[in-house]
Image: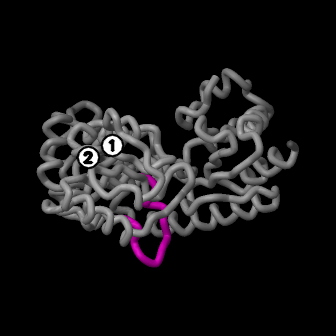
């Protein structure tokens, strides 16, 4: 059975490796293990269709958080759908910066992988920043320079910022604030990863108004659930939790790094929600951890790579270290 398609396949892991002596620890997804705690206090009316005014309030809350105008934001039932929806709108030739999400290579038929920004001087470029799975972080300056080069030739720059919320840097890493009607820039943001609520299935596209109009026309009425609207609106307005969580994730990533170094593994990446490690046989390491009820993420394009999500507690980190040490 292949585990390289995507993370989070916990039911299949249980079926393959059994329950084990301890509850399963899912480190395969890069989702924040510390979920936004206010979900229990959010009132949701399950008996009626999602309200248009409440949807716009969600988009306004998200726009304020992203630092963009409300007219440039549309809510989506997850960024996966949004990426595939926008793909046919893009001008070719289309390239995607690899390695990256499998979806980026599937958005446009015939798209071609590129290894660096320098390789792409025309057409459209799709990339993730921070990148998955290696945590590569590109500067906004370099991304905007690439955008300007592509724009004058009629191309687009599409930036998937699914993991940008977790970044703690002196300067913002997001290019969302540069989206404008005269730009050729489209940005995607994910709700579930940073807020630890992937099951809500909520994301956003940030784009020039004509693109937003096309997205809304294609997705139709009621694009997201009443639960997603209520939870997302409240969470994006919780500035105190957001600031505290960013610092907590940085410390958690530092603790993970220190443990990996103790186990003679070099942590790769700048995203505080996961680390990539290079091991002689990632498949064997994956299976060894799975037999200890710890799920990680291998990759079919590199047999040495294993991505490890952030453990949610000192006990979980110790358990991971012991499993790595017992190899």
Within 10 Å of disc 1 (Cα), the crowding (few <14, some 14-19, many 20+) is many
Q: Which x, y percent locates residue 26?
A: 63, 40
Q: Main secondary structure of the magenta part?
A: loop
Q: Are marks 2 and 1 in contact (CB under 8 Å)?
A: yes
Quarter of the image with the C terminus is top right
Q: Which x, y percent locates residue 253?
A: 63, 62
> Residue drawn at (69%, 36%), measured in percent from left and top?
24
Badge 2 element: strand
Q: Check residue 133 for magenta coloring.
A: no
Nearest the camera: 140 or 8?
Answer: 140
Which residue is under mark 2?
75
> Residue drawn at (85%, 49%), measured in percent from left and top?
325
Q: Which x, y percent locates residue 254?
A: 66, 66
Residue 198 image label: none
> Residue drawn at (39%, 50%), measured in percent from left and top?
190
**252 relative to 283, above or below:** below
Magenta stretch? 162-174
Which residue is under mark 1?
228
């Amino acid at each position: 059975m292949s585990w390289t398609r995507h993370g989070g396949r916990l039911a299949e892991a249980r079926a393959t490796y059994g329950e084990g002596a301890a509850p399963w620890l899912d480190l395969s997804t890069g989702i924040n293990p510390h979920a936004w705690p206010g979900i229990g206090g959010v009132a949701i009316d399950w008996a009626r269709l999602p309200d248009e005014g409440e949807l716009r309030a969600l988009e306004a809350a998200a726009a304020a958080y992203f630092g963009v105008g409300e007219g440039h934001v549309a809510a989506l039932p997850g960024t996966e759908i949004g990426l595939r929806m926008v793909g046919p709108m893009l001008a070719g030739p289309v390239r995607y910066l690899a390695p990256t999400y499998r979806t980026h290579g599937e958005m446009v038929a015939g798209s071609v992988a590129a290894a660096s920004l320098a390789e792409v001087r025309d057409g459209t470029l799709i990339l993730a920043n921070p990148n998955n799975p290696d945590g590569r972080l590109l500067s906004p300056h370099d991304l905007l320079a690439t955008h300007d080069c592509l724009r004058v030739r009629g191309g687009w720059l599409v930036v998937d910022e699914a993991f940008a919320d977790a970044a703690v840097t002196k300067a913002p890493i997001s290019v969302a604030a540069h989206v404008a009607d005269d730009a050729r820039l489209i940005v995607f943001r994910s709700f579930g990863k940073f807020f630890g609520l992937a099951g809500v299935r909520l994301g956003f596209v940030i784009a020039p108004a004509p693109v937003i109009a096309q997205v809304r026309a294609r997705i139709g009425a009621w694009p997201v659930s009443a639960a997603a609207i209520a939870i997302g609106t409240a969470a994006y307005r919780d500035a105190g939790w957001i600031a505290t969580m960013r610092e907590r994730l940085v410390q958690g990533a530092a603790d993970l790094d220190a443990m990996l170094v103790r186990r003679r593994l070099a942590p790769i990446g700048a995203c505080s929600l996961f680390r990539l490690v290079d091991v002689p046989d990632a498949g064997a390491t994956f299976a060894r951890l799975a037999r200890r009820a710890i799920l990680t993420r291998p990759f079919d394009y590199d047999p040495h790579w294993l991505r490890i999500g952030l453990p949610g507690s000192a006990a979980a980190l110790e358990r991971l270290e012991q499993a790595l040490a017992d190899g």
